[in-house]
Image: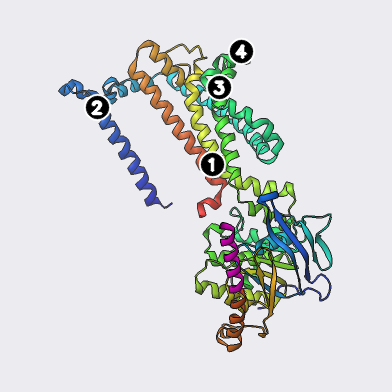
Amino acid sequence: MSAVVAQAPPGVNAGAISIREVGKSYGEGKGRVVALERCSFEIAPGEFRVIVGPSGCGKTTLLGAIAGFHPITEGEIRLDGELLCGPGVPQARPGGDRVVVFQHSTLFPWMTVLDNVTYGPVVQGRMTRDEARERARDQLAAAGLVGYEDLYPGELSSGVARRVEIVRALVNEPRVLLLDEPFRGMDSITKSVMQQGLLELYDRSRVTVFFITHDIEEAVFLGSRVSVMSTRPGRVQATIDVDIPRPREVGVLTSPCFRELVGQVSELVRDEARRAFEAGERELA
Amino acid sequence: MNAKARRTIVRRGILGVLAWLAFWEVGSQLGEWIGVAVPFLDKVPPPHAVVGDLAELIGEAGYWNSWALSLQRVLWGFAFAIAIGVPLALLIVTIRTFRGLFFPIFETLRPIPPLAWVPLAIIFWPTQELSITFVTFLGAFFPIVLNIVDGAAQIDRRLVLISRTLGLGRVGTFARVLLPSTLPAMVTGAAVGMGITWEVVVAAELISGGGNTSGDGGLGFLVWNSYQGGDLPRIVVGMISLGVAGYLSSTMVRALGARLMPWRRAA
């Protein structure tokens, strides 16, 4: 199996994300909700950053702001030094350099797997249809997806659909892959296969990954660094380095070092969840 | 669907029709036989009387001419409803200002029964055929537009976001995401609209002066004319003809839709 994903030239356009003092609020007056407040952190090029935090802490809001799905109200986000959104440019322009994979499939139901995967490069005019198809076949093969090319998404299992979606994202050679709880709701066996598959794709491409999850073991298993976000205001509370060498195999899951890190992250998340819960109760009282 | 499943469906369909015919025959005659009448059905001529009239009509060129005439009016009305309704619906869906300006008018015109349009239809158009076609057009137009507008509201917003992320502009996203997303609603609207053109053809053909024989002048006219002539079995023949025509043409619209949406067959 050859490394079909092009290596990004180091240094330039390598997918460094810089989030500075980002704020996002919805509504006005009494109904105003602050989703993010003075949220700052940096993601290094090629880093696999996992964001964990209680529900409603603004993880998805932050991801959407990077992708350009909605505007931010304060601060700025940069990609490799270029301003994505910030003062004067409230909303980033969506683009193929920051591709999102959601929890539920967003494959186009009316296109075959192959057409879905080649869609990006072809409409961007980066490749001819034939080039894109050849490349897509290689990438699908590398992800263990042979024989699915001419099926429609409605015919795929959720695991296969998700893998196709990740391949579709990678074919665009994004600088950042934005993953919003992509494996949520999968059974544990499928999930473990998916995680392993994602790690293989990551090890080959070394694309910067922004990965949101609720699953702490998943966070530590996948991430180079794990950031714990707090609720209201949504910001990064702590970031933990995961010094487990890559490539990582499932054996890692039982190592003392892994358990130790999981315990550490769990504690931080638990504190945040409790605080969020109490804050919620205060609001209701 | 495999051949076996198809055969089962056909068998059940035939069985259903036969059962209904038996029920109808017995129901309409029960009063005569035992003196206990079945409400409504006792006023309808029994199937064997209708079949007699049908056999008579089938022999008349005028009956087949009615089929041809009605079909022609329905198809033209339907074609115009698609040609005008689809672009209009897409405008309503994509341009908020347009929706604001136009949708209230649309919703006011929609509940007006096609029968109420008949006088205006006569005044509007120079020929009788055009007037009739206009009324059938109205029947198909509203469900087509409404289905697309409702269908577009159900579109998965994330598909639009992903398309923009993958590098498509607004126009491209419209063509490659919005259109295929609304296609199922278009097909449903077309199938419903096609059925309604047959529903309104009776009202539309009131405009028609009829042909040389009682069967001539369209299937809708056949019903109306038979009513005025007091020929009950013939009314029923006309009604059944309209029903069969509507069923067949809606089925064809759906079959065409299925061809346009291969991914739906897959799911």
Q: Which mark is residue B256?
A: 1
Q: Where, by quadrant of the figure, is residue A143 drawn?
A: bottom right
Q: Which residue is mark 3?
A: B135
In the image, B65: left or right of A145? left
Q: Tell me the magenta residue range.
A: A269-285
Q: Which residue is mark 4?
A: B123
Q: Where, by quadrant of the figure, is residue A49 drawn?
A: bottom right
Do circles 1 and 2 both sit on a common chain? yes
Overall secondary structure of the magenta section: helix
Position of residue B238 measured from the top left corner of the image (x, y, whole percent): 40, 22
- Which is more N-terminal, label 2 or label 4? 2
Let me know if residue A276 is in the magenta part. yes
The residues bearing labels 2 and 3 have C-alpha atoms spaced at a distance of 36 Å
SS state under label 4: helix
Q: Amino acid at mark 3?
A: Val
Picture residue at 25% right of the left edge, 32% below the top: B22
- The local crowd at label 4, few if under 14, some if 14 to 19, many if 20 or more residues have their Cα within 10 Å, is few
Foreground mark, 4 or 1, reads 4
Residues marked 4 and 1 touching at CB (< 8 Å): no
